[in-house]
Amino acid sequence: MLGISADNKLKRLIVVGDRVLIKPKDATDRTASGLYLPPTVQEKEQVQSGYVIKVGPGYPIPTPSEDEPWKEAEEAVKYMPLQAQEGDLALYLQRNAIDLQYEGEQYVIVPQGSILLLERSEDLD
C-alpha cells in the first residue's frame, strides 16, 4: 500500500467536489495461463484498481432557508462526505477516469460514482 507522509508532495493537491485521486496498481502483463498481453489490451480493460490517495470534500448540501432574516447568515458550505477514504483499494470504471501525471507519477481522478468497490484494511469487528 502507498503511504502518505508529511513530506509527501501530494499534500499540496486539493481534490475538488466528489472526485477521488487514485494511484493505479501496476497492471499484470500476463493472463492466468501465462500469455503476455500487449499494453494496449491492458489499458482498455473497463475495470481498473488502485489505491485512494486523496478524496474531495464530498457533495455540497444546500443550506436551508431561514425564516428569521435578522439572524446572521452562515456562509460556510457543508458537504456530505464520500465513502472512499485514503488508503482504500478501489475498483473503478476506466472510461470515467481522467489520467494525469504529477511529479513523475501516474494518477487518475475519478468521480465517486465511478467507484464500484472499496476494500478497507481496518478491522470490521
Image: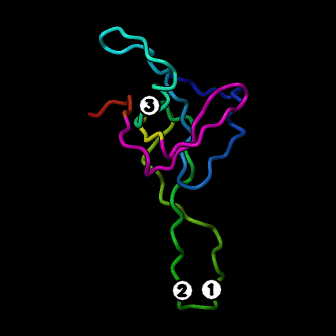
Q: Nearer the viewer, residue 76 or 42?
A: 42
Q: Residues within 10 Å of mark 1 (few under 14, many from 20)?
A: few
What secondary structure prevails in the magenta region?
A: strand
Indicate which label's residue lies in the foreground, 1 or 3: 3
Which amino acid type is shown beneath numbered disc 2? Glu
Helix, strand or loop status at disc 1? loop
**Quadrant holding the C terminus:** top left
Determine crowd level at label 3: few under 14, some 14-19, many 20+ residues with C-alpha closer than 10 A.
many
Identity of the amino acid at label 1?
Lys
Residue located beneath label 3 in the image? 49
Tell whether label 2 touches label 1 (CB within 8 Å): yes
Image location of residue 96, percent across then percent down: 50, 46
Mark 2 is surrounded, within 10 Å at the Cα level, by few (under 14), some (14 to 19) or many (20 or more) other residues, namely: few
Q: Earlier in the sequence, mark 1 or mark 2?
A: 2
**Residue pointed to by mark 1:** 71
Q: How many angstroms separate mark 1 from mark 3 (CA)?
A: 48 Å
Q: Residue at x 53, y 43 (%)?
A: 97
Query: Is 104 in front, or is 17?
Result: 104
74 shown above or below 41? below
Q: Which residue is identified by label 2? A: 66
Q: Earlier in the sequence, mark 3 or mark 2?
A: 3
Disc 3 marks a residue whose amino acid type is Ser
Q: Which residues are magenta?
A: 95-118
Indicate whether residue 30 is drawn in magenta.
no
Secondary structure at badge 3 equals: strand
